[in-house]
Image: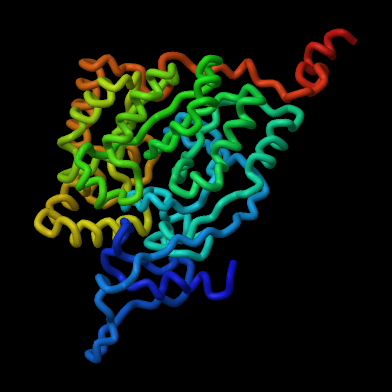
Amino acid sequence: MPDGMSQRGASILPGPRKGRGAVSNPPVRFETTAREAFDDGWGSLVDLADLPPLPTTLLKDGARSAMAYNSSPDLGFDRSINPYRGCEHGCIYCYARPSHAYLGHSPGLDFETLLYFKPDLPALLERELSRPGYVPRPVALGANTDPYQPVERTLSLTRGVLEVLERFGHPVTIVTKSAGVLRDLDILKRLAARNLVHVCLSVTTLDPNLARRMEPRAASPARRIAAIAELARAGVPAGVLAAPMIPGINDAELERILATAAGAGAQRAGYVLLRLPLEIAGMFEAWLRTHFPDRAARVLALVRETRAGALYDSRFGQRQTGTGPYADMLAQRFRAAIARLDLHRTNTGTQPLDCHQFAVPDAPKRQREPEAQLALL
């Protein structure tokens, strides 16, 4: 890490910045000291509106493995691949933000401006899939940060991963907020023909103005819906994820998001209630009071109603959907909507992805089928 890079966050003044989602840059929770801006009366704090846009800095990630494994009982996958750490989309509610603290950076503006990329990811993945005894199961691409964020246009790491998965016949699921997924439509069509891929577009709102505040550098809602339609026309199983649903902000749009996506060709749907782990709670409150000062208190009260009086409940089985009357009503609305729209097939698509096509390219048959070879001895 370049000298002083871990202190960059302390030098970013709080407040809204053009093209960025967070309005704060909280200190790294592992540090023993913290800095904050202070006006000493001599005009020492400049007007944020006069500052240039914050640039995006790319840093190499020296990752030694391609896949991360989990045993969470409320996730639909046990392994994932993330080409990037940090995300330029700038979604204020992103549950991945606190992970930036492990790199010595703030989960706030640092998360959006200091991005790590894994240049050796396709090679690492090929090595892991070639290991004797590897058992294939669907791998989630972009489970933490978006695999099609703007930097992917030039680095093409996600495409490299898809090329490896196609060669190995390995099933994959993709979640993204970007219409950039259509760039790889050629690979996705071939994978879909073999029942090896599902793609899900995350649509938080259909209001472009609200989207620009919540997720300033993600594709517009209209482009995401159009991407669902294009995937469906190409025969690629596509779905919609209405996430997160934020009480008092976008929750009234749930049915309309699902109906619009279904009309575009979505085959399945899901939703997630707003999650505010660790630093995100304070960051979200700062964002809320900046953009919606008239309803901030009401929104926070509704969030606490779904989290047993707190801003977050991390318990498995409840962290995704919450508890209490409001959370129950949201779940009932979702179930009624997918029944009406024939979007029953949640999470897994029209059929489970095929794990039986997996094979190490050019590997001797005795390596791919050890049980069959032993039976002949």
Question: Which residue in the rendered view is the most extreme toward the left?
Answer: 294
Q: Can you give x and y, in whole percent of width and height, for residue 277 in the image? A: 36, 52
Q: Is residue 145 above or below residue 317?
A: below
Relative side of 94 to 301, left or right: right
Q: Nearer the viewer, residue 188 or 247?
A: 188
Quarter of the image with the C terminus is: top right
Q: Is residue 274 above or below residue 104?
A: above
Question: Which residue in the rendered view is the most extreme toward the top?
Answer: 376
The residue that appears at 23% across and 39% down in the rendered structure is 205
Q: Can you give x and y, in whole percent of width and height, for residue 43 in the image? A: 24, 87
Q: Is residue 244 above or below residue 291?
A: above
Q: Nearer the viewer, residue 342 or 114?
A: 114
The residue that appears at 79% across and 11% down in the rendered structure is 372
Identify the image quadrant of residue 132: top right
Q: Can you give x and y, in whole percent of width and height, for residue 154 in the image? A: 53, 47
The residue that appears at 40% across and 24% down in the rendered structure is 231
Identify the image quadrant of residue 323: top left
Q: Can you give x and y, in whole percent of width and height, for residue 15 in the image? A: 27, 68
Relative side of 235 to 49, left or right: right
Question: Which residue in the rendered view is the most extreme toward the right?
Answer: 377
Relative side of 304 to 167, left or right: left
Name the colouring of the figure: rainbow
Quarter of the image with the N terminus is: bottom right
Q: How many marks?
A: 0
